Amino acid sequence: MKALVYNGPGLKAVEERPVPQVQDAGDAIVRITRTTICGTDLHILKGDVPSCEPGRILGHEGVGIVDSIGTGVTVFAPGDHVLISCITACGRCDYCRRGMPSHCTTGGWILGNIIDGTQAEYVRIPHADTSLHAIPEQAGADALVMLSDILPTGFECGVLNGKVAPGSTVAIVGAGPIGLAALLTAQLFSPARIIMIDLDEARLAIARRFGATDTINSGTRDAAAALMEMTDARGADTVIEAVGVAATFELCQLLVAAGGTIANVGVHGAKADLHLEHLWSRNITITTRLVDTVSTPQLLRMVEAKQLDPGELVTHHFAMADMMDAYEVFSRAAETKALKVIIEADDPRTARPAA
């Protein structure tokens, strides 16, 4: 089968790999019909994620069709159409029972990190009963791929952790896919204002189309001064950091109102300063989180009811044979205007190759 393989910092290739086999009773083998590339995959390629070793098939998002199952799988059967969660959950350990499957003792974020991932024609899913979601056969697959990771990430790590509330002011720093996912889901709580901050005017235009009430181009304006002017020097009740670099985390500290919340969503590969000399008396909360995907069933129902359309985030489509081109486009998003790219099976009807 074709697979996108990480071969060390800065190195990747499409390679032929054996089709995965069931290893444990709870496993399912899923034939991928659509997958995508995440900003986290780019962090891996930079060498920011030491747990991901060379030789690993990347990817932790996708939809597909169950090909085979282990003897312990009871919820799914071959032929079922499924959404793959980016978080693998046993459903039994202390962390899973506490609603934190991201820290599952035998799962968590392992796909495309600790075990081979979804940027391939087939993938092995451990704990299949609690790590897959049934989807309608005719559902909009592009939109559903967004439910593997970015929509629950923006919702859980940004909106819920950030305590977005009716009538509040929300600032989102970073108008990439995660920031836009936070923008889409923040509107479920009816804030009075959502202010999107980014360097890219094209992405700010998309943010306005998706529902941002205000935008600030931080490349041409002092973002902190502009936001304070917009809010009568009060600041934002919720500030969502959706970039993952020191400068944007430090900017968030200048934007937050007294009593407000900074919800960090970005993946940080280097240290960032916390300015307690300014914040110690301001009653703020700072949250961090790895997505748990506990909201996926809820978000799936909203997508099926057409209350959310994350498929709007998809800008490019590629065949699986062209995954290197997909990475090139996604990694140069400022030039290519890419948000999310969809990688499709070359022929969804292709029968399973001989093992």
Image: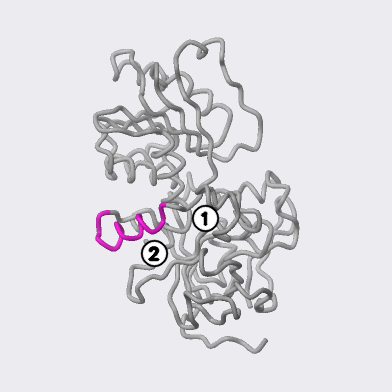
| Element under disc 2 | helix
State the separation of the CA atoms marked 2 and 1. 18 Å
- On residue 142, the disc is 2
The x, y position of residue 234, in whole percent, is 33, 15
Q: Which residues are magenta?
A: 295-307
Q: Could you tell me if the residues under marks 2 and 1 are in contact, i.e. CB atoms within 8 Å?
A: no
229 is higher (above) or lower (below) than 194: above
Taking the spot 61% from the left edge, 60% from the top edge, the residue there is: 111
Residue 220 appears in which quarter of the rendering? Answer: top left
Taking the spot 55% from the left edge, 50% from the top edge, the residue there is: 331
Q: Quadrant of the N terminus?
A: bottom right
Residue 202 appears in which quarter of the rendering? Answer: top left
Q: Is residue 30 magenta?
A: no
- For the residue pair 8 and 24, the one nearer the viewer reads as 24
| Amino acid of disc 2 | Asp
Q: Which residue has dot 1 on it?
A: 329
